[in-house]
Amino acid sequence: MQDRWNAFMPYPDADVGHAPIGSLFGLRLAVKDLFDVAGYPTAAGNAAVLVASGIKRATAPLVQTLLEAGACFVGKTNTDELAYSLIGGNIHFGMPINPRDPTLIPGGSSSGSAVAVAAGLADLGLGTDTSGSIRLPAAINGLIGWRPTHGSLDNRALRPLAPSFDVPGFMTRSLEPMAAVMSAVGMPAANDQPSSILIPEDIFETIDGTIADEMIASIRSAAMPIRRIDFISSFSLADLAVAFTTILQKEAWESNKTLFERSPDAIAADIAARLRAGSRLDDGEVREARRIRTLFSGEIERLLCENMVVALPTVAMNPPARDSGRESFAAFRSACIKLLCLSGLSGCPQLAFPIASRAGNTSLSLFGARNADSLLMNVARRIGA
């Protein structure tokens, strides 16, 4: 396969079979290089991990499920190093090229899977989402991005980053293949519609007013009851982002401590700095962050208990240029985590999809109660994603 987008890892081809029939037959599957696939190594975007990997003898159960549903494996895809970024860059294997605008970042960490789907090299992009690693690249590349309910999909033979947040998920160019994937992985169908769509003023106030108006107009097009609320939580978005980042850094350090101690020079400076920050967190900080997560999860459960769905922007600002400096990337990541952390902290599903906008690159998200994944799909169809 000719890959001028740098979406795929440059591995020699190995035979990966798939069922000759099934609900995903005819769909090409690109797999983030965090999942094991028999006949391939697993690098997690890091050269030292690649050297130590060896060729895997078994395929991750989730990938195997997709193959048994007929999906055709077309390659393992590039990822931000250790899946620990939202930008899409990688000092070892390069930054994939955004097919929509080659001057912009592709977003990460599921950068290769997003680019493969956006460039038409795959129909299904399997990735992971910890702090937004499916939703953000989906938004930047004009794709549908699904972060499932935490714990609902099999995550065995998947290299972890922060296990209490990590979720396997998918990207597609349209809703129909995403619906097929949901069915193939065992997500129960939902035949109902939400009692109302909630629009949190505190969240929509964080983005450009014109874009917010266009998003709300799209929501109104679904002809479902809409209710505006002042706040999604008693905690500020900034406080939630701090709690999320604290837990993320602690777990990321625990997941990568051995690698860091053995091969500190094999990790990019910015990734290593975040790992060191996680190593320095004291137990009190982490306990407080987890306390906030528990309280926030309870608030969200009460808010969404009556079949409600929350609408929100997927990202907080336009993506930076791919040649921007580290400070610009850090500012973008920080702004976006304030919105992207909500699903991580609550364990709730989120479905991101593009909408028509004068800005030309706008992504709306639907956020629902745990296990309401298919309900989000129903609403997205009504909105016309």
Image: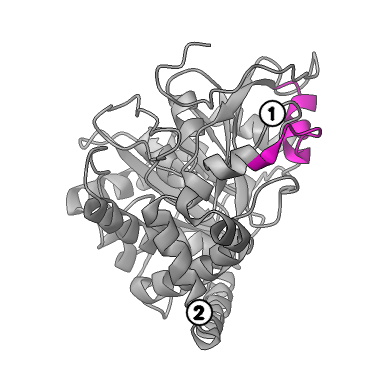
The residue range painted magenta reads 52-71
Residue 117 is left or right of residue 148, and the answer is left
Q: Is residue 171 magenta?
A: no
Task: Tell me the tag on residue 315.
Answer: none
- Mark 2 vs mark 1, CA separation in Å: 38 Å
Q: Which residue is mark 2?
A: 289
Q: Is residue 66 magenta?
A: yes
Nearer to us in this view, 185 or 74: 74
Q: Which residue is mark 1?
A: 40
Residue 267 is left or right of residue 102, and the answer is right
| Quadrant (top left, top right, bottom left, bottom right) of the C terminus | top left
Earlier in the chain: of badge 2 and badge 1, it is 1
* Residue found at the far bottom of this picture: 284
Q: Secondary structure at mark 1?
A: loop
Residue plotted at (42% across, 63% down): 274
Q: How is the image coloured?
A: one colour
The answer to which image quadrant residue 139 occupies is: top left
Residue 336 is left or right of residue 147, and the answer is left
The answer to which image quadrant residue 60 occupies is: top right
